[in-house]
Image (cartoon, rainbow, N blue to C red):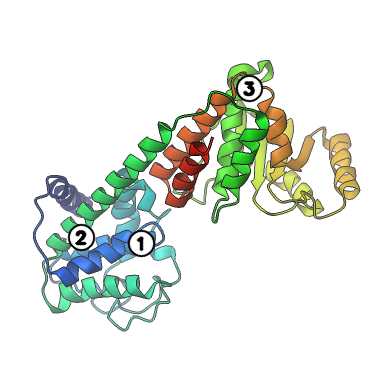
Amino acid sequence: MKQANEHLNILNDALAASRKKQTGTISKTQIGYVKCLVDNAEAQKSLIAVTITSLIEKIRNPAQDVRLHRSEFKGGYSGRSLDTRIITPFLKKHFPRFAPKESGWLTRSIEQPHPFTMNFPGKIRNEAVKKAFLAILNDVEEKKQPSRVYLEIILAELLKKCGKESKIAANTKNAIVADILTIDIIIEMLEKHFSLKQSSRLPVIAIYTIYQLLLENVKIYQSKTLNALRSHTTSDRYVGYADIEIFETISKTPFEVVEVKHNIPIDCQMIQDVLKKIKDAPIKRYFVLTTANPNFKDSKKKIFDLVHKIKAERNIDVVPNGIIPSLKYYLRLVPDLKDFLAKYTFNISEEFKSGSDVKKLHISEWMKIVGNL
């Protein structure tokens, strides 16, 4: 406990210094290492966590060679343990977009049984980031560069990056929505947005947004609760039913769930898997929706024969469909279409701030799509 408090105190002190811009100075080359690491923080969460873990341990225990990041190394320590207990929770609290799920050491490129020397063989995809990471630890161990200065400047750069991205998110939430909207216009906007690279989270947010409005406006949902979307930092140990979950407010039992597939057509196996996922839960309806076109891989007859069999045997309505047809139907139930655009815009903005599934590209392109109204 004492060691944990020491590590956390060092982190909090460094963060306070970074907020006040009272950090030390390092060379242009070293600044380049930090910027390379931070600029790629969204894609390299593990290296952010591992670098900070190493610097924290070096500050607390100057005699420790932090390149020896495993306890089985002679003279080594458990970097993964420290990261899991202290560093990743700290990142989730202050920099959620750049925090790994549980530990930076869970990636194959990092967990290898080799010290973090300049010839570390881990296959980190971005060679420039790998070089920057190893160079920082090399500076600390071989050139006696103060770890605290590196730590404070890394945190300062993360704060700066978060500040810029918060402005982007705020601008998105304040986007002007046209006075005249139709369902077809909104569908066209969403189809453009869903077509972007790495956009699998966007259809989930669109369906989630629809449910937020359904709970406000449709009688059948007014005694129900919509579970918050689980973020990318949710532990893999969490077992849910699907991407979107609606529960009975009083009994807390699951009522209706939605599984969203992006560019994956629905087949019979997906329908069969529904029964494994819900087991004996009292779910009334289980939607399997996809952005793929065509929506179905197997013949519709085979799929719906299976759907009818499940209904007859288990009294569960499994509803396979395309996301676009579903959105067209649900949008008819929304009193003011501007409410959908406003909530969707707000939701992608919040997801952008709190996780890394929504990318900067998704935000900037949505601004263009809205602007083109």
Residue 254 vertical position relative to residue 364 in the rendered view, above or below: above
Instruction: Pick the residue in front: 331 or 226.
Output: 331
Place of residue 46 in the rendered image (x, y in percent of width and height, measured from the top left): 37, 62
Residue 234 visible to an observer of this rendering: no
Q: What residue type is labelled 2?
A: Ile
The image quarter containing residue 118 is bottom left
- Say whether disc 2 or disc 1 marks the residue closer to the N-terminus: 1
Horizontal relation, residue 239 to residue 55: left or right:
right
Horizontal relation, residue 62 to residue 79: left or right:
left
Which residue is label 1 attached to? 40
Residue most extreme to the front: 372
Place of residue 281 in the rendered image (x, y in percent of width and height, measured from the top left): 69, 35
Which secondary structure lies at badge 3?
loop
Residue shown at the point (22%, 72%) measured from the top left: 137
Which secondary structure lies at badge 1?
loop
Place of residue 318 in the rendered image (x, y in percent of width and height, measured from the top left): 78, 38
Which residue is label 2 attached to? 56
Q: Which amino acid does label 3 sit on?
A: Val
Which residue is label 3 attached to? 334
Mark linked to residue 370: none
Residue 166 visible to an observer of this rendering: yes
Residue shown at the point (34%, 46%) measured from the top left: 165
C-alpha gap between disc 3 and disc 1: 40 Å
Residue shown at the point (54%, 35%) measured from the top left: 373
Q: What residue type is labelled 1?
A: Asn
Residue 58 vertical position relative to residue 350 in the rendered view, above or below: below
Q: Disc 2 or disc 1, which is closer to the eye?
A: 1
Residue shown at the point (20%, 74%) measured from the top left: 65
C-alpha gap between disc 2 and disc 3: 51 Å
The reply to whether callout 2 and callout 3 are in contact (CB within 8 Å) is no
